[in-house]
Image (spheres, coloured by chain):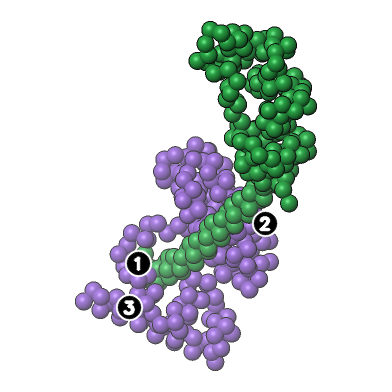
Chain colours: A purple, B green
Amino acid sequence: MINNKSFDLERVYTENREKFIGFALGYSVSKETAIDIYQDAVVALMEQIKKNKPIAVKSSVATYLFAIGKYMLFHYLKKEKRLTVEIEDLPEIEWDFMEAAQKEEQVGLLQLYYEKMGEHCKKILQLFYYEEKKLEEIVQLLGYENKDVVKSQKSRCIKQLKTLIAEHNG
Amino acid sequence: MDEESKISISIHLAERAAAKKQLQALEASIAAKKKRYIWQWATAASIVVAALFTTLQLLRGPDYDALFSAYYEPYPNTIAPVERTANSDTRLSQAFAYYDGGDYEKAIQAFQQLQQSDQWKDLQLYLGIAQMALNQNEEARKSFEAAIAAKGEMASIATWYLGLLYIKLEQPEKAKPLIQSTAATDNPFAGNAKKLGNELGFFP
């Protein structure tokens, strides 16, 4: 199974790029849109790998990438009301675009202040929320004494984030 | 949506945005590489085309047509100027009238009827020029050679025109001694013969 360490982003991106863009152009999207969707698909792939989701058990990286890209392309076409394929043809992919949440003001603020946090806090929050690592794994990855230390450190980071937003809201 | 979910989603969106930024930079570097590659390919291709063109030019040799056109002009009528009087040889005048007017077919016929004339030795030069103008190249060659062999006043001029005829026929090896000879003797075409000989590498 592919993991974060063995994943060569540049190679995967380059090797599958032409094939996917060629496929997307067949649906009369612009090249810019095709590239944008392809990049979203690669982001999804990277996310699955970081979360240690067993993508390579069922399929190869290329197959998964193509499937998620196709799913995202159809999602785009559906949004643009240009979808000409039957919904049953959509690949079976679980992917949350988080589109509704993006419209929420507080989510936008959390995103903004998360990006401005120190590297240390960002790393803990990234591992816990984004990569969905368990506290024991974070202990190993960041060299903490035990999971209680990680837990309290994570709480401090969340508090800091909330304080930044409270200050913003004045 | 509870607070924990909002935090999780925000971090997801931020991490996805950061990853996308990384991919956009990768895409830009691919585009730059491609552009560089296209330029390198285009440069290499133009070098190959230029080399091929030069090689072809070298293989094809000089453009003899262009050289002939640059150096050829009909030799002026110095034998029977048009202001001749009624006592003049009217057949000769008529032949040159055709020649001067560029009516080479009639000029050829008229010159050929003057074989018994005293000036026949020199008339063969004009006959050859008229034949060359009509692409009767073999006849022209014989006329020039006859004019040269007759050793008349026009022999050196006929040498030049025979040389030009061989240039026209793309036979430089036959033109070479004739051009060299014209350049070496005192005649109106000596300068042109030197220039043409230099262009064709006839002189060391």
Rendered residue at 64%/47% (across/down): B49
Ranked by sequence position, the earlier of labels 2 and 1 is: 2
- Residue A54 placement (x, y as % from top left): 63, 64
Q: Specify whether residue B202 is in view.
A: yes
Rendered residue at 57%/70% (across/down): A50
Quickly name the residue at label 3.
A162
Helix or strand or loop: what does disc 3 sit on? Answer: helix
Quickly name the residue at label 1.
A107
Q: Distance of mark 2 from mark 3, alpha carbons? A: 41 Å
Query: Which amino acid type corresponds to the residue marked 1 in the rendered image?
Result: Val
Residue placed most toward the observer, A3 or A23: A23
In the visual, does A159 lie left or right of A8? Answer: left
Helix or strand or loop: what does disc 1 sit on? Answer: helix
In the visual, does B124 lie left or right of B87? Answer: right
Rendered residue at 56%/8% (across/down): B87
In the visual, does B170 lie left or right of A164? Answer: right
Quickly name the residue at label 2.
A59
Query: Which amino acid type corresponds to the residue marked 2 in the rendered image?
Result: Ser
Instruction: Say which quarter of the image contains residue A155.
Output: bottom left
